[in-house]
Amino acid sequence: MKRAWTLPALLVACGALVAVTQAVGGSVLTAAVSLLLFVLLGGLYSPLVFPRSVGAAEARRRSAADGHPVVYWRAGCKYCLRLRFRLGRGARQLHWVDIWRDPDGAAVVREANGGDETVPTVVVAGRPYTNPDPGWLRGQLPPAA
């Protein structure tokens, strides 16, 4: 859990340092804008922009029941972020597993990628795909009922 928040915390801390430096120099408005940008960037790279993660076993169980793909991801991964935003609202239909919070999820990713923890790794109908195209993945979702 700590690793998921390291990058966002560092971004906010750097933003605070930049803002204080700018405020001391007399540029309060620039300091406020800089701090806001760093806070937004920290939020973007935090787990907050992803749907709630579940454990790997629970994701597999849910996927077997509803046929929706399982996405293995980690915070700070720009490819995971790209997938999340390009899926839009469709991302809520997927089962998300944070490999930094779930050792079983990390093991699944390593097994699928020859020992590497390459994410996003998406499992569709029991078959893993590493960093799939978001358009293709949208096509793999079951039709809305």
Image: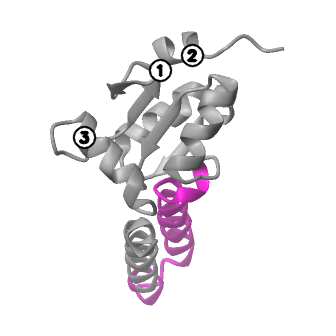
* CB contact under 8 Å: marks 2 and 3: no
Q: Residue 107 placed where, x, y %?
A: 31, 50
Q: Residue at x 51, y 71 (%)?
A: 35
Give the side of residue 40 with respect to residue 116, left or right: right
Quadrant containing the C terminus in the rendered view: top right
* CB contact under 8 Å: marks 2 and 1: yes
Q: Is 44 included in the stretch rendered in magenta?
A: yes
Label the magenta part by its dominant secondary structure: helix
Query: How crowded is the residue under tag 2: few (<14 C-alpha within 10 Å), some, or many (20+)?
Result: some
Give the side of residue 47 with respect to residue 15, left or right: right
Residue bearing mark 2: 138
Amino acid type, mark 2: Arg
Res. 134 mark:
1
Q: Residue 46 placed where, x, y %?
A: 50, 60
As measured in the structure, the alpha-carbon distance from the residue carrying label 2 to the one carrying label 1 is 6 Å
Q: Which residues are magenta?
A: 21-49
Q: Is residue 2 visible?
A: yes
Q: Is residue 99 visible?
A: no
